[in-house]
Image (spheres, rainbow, N blue to C red):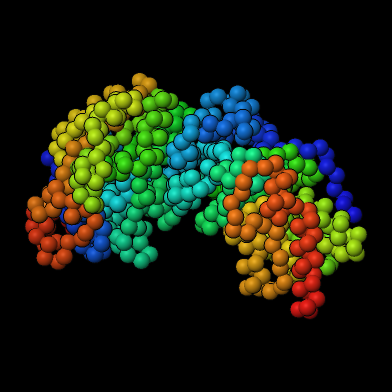
Amino acid sequence: MLSTTDLSKISSQVRRDIIRMVHGASSGHPGGSLGAADFLVALYFACMKPDPNKFSIDGTGEDIFFLSNGHISPAWYSVLARYGYFKPGELATFRKLDTRLQGHPSILDETPGVRMASGSLGQGLSVALGAAISKKLNGDPKTVYCLMGDGELQEGQNWEALMYGAAKGVDNIIATVDYNQKQIDGPVEKVLSLGNLRAKLESFGWLVLEMNGNDMAEILDQLAVAKQQLNQGIPVIIIMHTKMGFGVDFMLDNHEWHGVPPNDEQAEKALEQLEETMGDY
Amino acid sequence: MNNYTNLGSKDTRSGFGEALLELGKENENIVALCADLVGSLKMGDFAKAFPDRFFEVGIAEANMIGLAAGMTIGGKIPFTGTFANFSTARVYDQIRQSVAYSKKNVKICASHAGVTLGEDGATHQSLEDMGMMKMLPFMTVINPCDFNQTKAATKAIAVHEGPVYLRFGRPKVPNFTSPDQEFVIGKAVMLHEGSDVSIFATGHLVWKALEAIQILAEEGIKAELINFHTIKPLDNEAVLASVKKTGCVVSAEEHMRNGGLGDSIAQLLALHHPAPMEMVAVDDKFGESGTPEELLSRYGLDTPDVVAAVRAVLARKVHSG
C-alpha cells in the first residue's frame, strides 16, 4: 500500500510529464491536466489497481475507468505510463504523427488502458453507465469510474445520463466531476453557471460526495467512502474541488492555461517547481 | 415477367421485431434499448421475453447511444431502436465518437425512414440518414426491401462484428423475398437479368422497380434489376458487371439524392466506368404530411418515376452510344 507521500511523489512526476508533453507537442491542455493529476494517480495506484499487463477492452473482473473530458489526456497518458501500461518514453510521441497518444484519446491504435474515444464532450457518463450495466449483466462485481469536467456538464447528454442512472438504480458506478470552475472562455460561473451543482445532482437522485481533489489524503478517504456506498440502488458522484494548473504557480487557477502550451522559458520555470521523482521520460 | 409474388404485405419493422426476439433466445449477449417507441419499433416481444436485457431509456437518444456503446464493453451486442431521424441526425456526434470512431459493436436500428412514414410529416421523415451514416468510417449501412429481408438482415448484423446502421420503414409493403434467404452483408441480390438498362434499387423502391420492369418489358425493354440492400460497403463488382453489360443505369431509393445509394454508385462509375445515369430519389426537399402512396408519388419515387427514368437514360445511352 502506497502512502500519501508516495502517491504525491508520483503526482509530481505526472505533472512534470504533463508540462513536458504539452511543451514538446507545442499544443495540448495543461491546466485541467495538472488539476486532475492527484485524482488519477490515486485512482490507479491506490483505488482501482488494475493489472496493466492484462489490459482488455472488456476489462472483465477489473475496475474500469472512462475519461469523459478527453482533453486532459496528458494527465491520463502519464498515469497510464507510470502505472505500467506502456513505457514512459512513449509520452514523447504525444500529439505527433503516428502516435498512439492522440490529442484526444482514441482506441484505433489500441492504446493500452483506453477503451473509448473521448474529446467531444458530454458523452462519457452515458458510456460509463452502459459499461456498468454490462458488468451487472455479466455478474462482474467490479466498479466503473468516470471523470468529467465541470464545464462539460453544460452538455445536455450528461443530464440525460444523470436522470437515467438514478431512475434505473445503476449502483456500481462512481462518477467524479472535476470542479475547477474554469473553462476555455473563463469562469464557469460567467460562461454558463451550473448554479447549485450539488443540489442539482442530488435532485437528480445521485448520492453526492465532495472532496478536495488536490489533497491526496482526502481523495483516498472519499474514494473509500464512495466505495462503501456502492450496490445500494443509488449511483454515486463526487464533486471534486480542484484548481486548474495546480502545482505550477503561474498557471494556478487561471483559465488561460486551459488549452495553451508553455513556451521554453515557461516550461523551464514550471519544471523548477515540480520534483522529478521517477525519472523524466 | 415478374417472377416475384407478394406473399402478403407486411411492415419491415415487424421483420426486425421478430428477428430480435429470436436473437434474444439464441444469444444471451443480445440486449436492446429503445427511446420510448417500443410499439412502433416492434420491440415489445423482446422486452417482454427478456426484461433484464431490455432497456427503456426514455426520450433521450443521445444517452441511449452512449449506453449502447458502453454495453459493448463486456461483450454485449446492443440493438438500439427509434425512428430514423432520431437514430441519426439527433445523435450524429454520439454515433461518430462513441460508436464509429470507438469501433463499438452497436446495431443502430431505425424505423419509419423516408417519406412512407406518412402523415407525421417532414420532422419525422428522415431522407438524409443513409448519407450521414455512410460517411462514417467503419459503419455498415443496410436498407432491406421487405419483411423477410429485414428479418434476415437483423439476424445477419448480430453476427457481424462492428457498428451497423439498419434502416427500415413503417408501412405495410409487399413481402416477396424468400423467408429462408441467406443475407450476405455487402452482397447485392440479382432479381432480374436484362441487357438494356441496369436498375439498382434499395428498400421500399425495390418492389416499385419490380413493377416498373414489367411495364418496360411490355415495351420490349430488357431491364436488369439488382437489389442493393447494403449501401455500405457497396457491392462494387455487382455495379460494374451489370453496367458493363447494359451501358446505362437507374438508381432508385427512398432517400435524398445527396448521400444515397445513387450517389455511391455515381462515384464508383465516375471513377471506373462512366455511363449515363438517372436517379430516382428526393431532390433536395423536405417531405410533408400525406399517405405513404401519395408521398411516394409526390416526391417522384413511384413506379411511373422508375419507368420514366429508364426511358430517359435509354435516350441518353442512344445519343452517347
What residue appears at the point 84 percent right and 57 percent down from the top-left corner?
Answer: B213
Classify residue B295 as left or right of residue A151.
right
Give how far across and how far down residue A24 sits, in percent: 23, 64
* Viewer-nearest residue: A5 or B71: B71
- The answer to whether residue B164 shows anywhere in this view is yes
In the rendered image, the vertical position of residue A37 relative to residue B186, given as above or below: above
* Viewer-nearest residue: B295 or B78: B295
What residue appears at the point 14 percent right and 47 percent down from the top-left corner?
Answer: A253
Give how far across and how far down residue B253 sits, in percent: 68, 54
- The answer to whether residue B239 shows anywhere in this view is no
Classify residue A232 as left or right of residue A260.
right
Placement of the C terminus of chain A among the 4 image quadrants: bottom left
Classify residue A136 as left or right of residue B269.
left
Residue A133 found in image quarter:
top left
Q: How many marks?
A: 0
What residue appears at the point 66 percent right and 64 percent down from the top-left corner?
Answer: B265
Placement of the N terminus of chain A among the 4 image quadrants: top left
* Viewer-nearest residue: B133 or A30: B133
Classify residue B218 as left or right of residue B114.
right
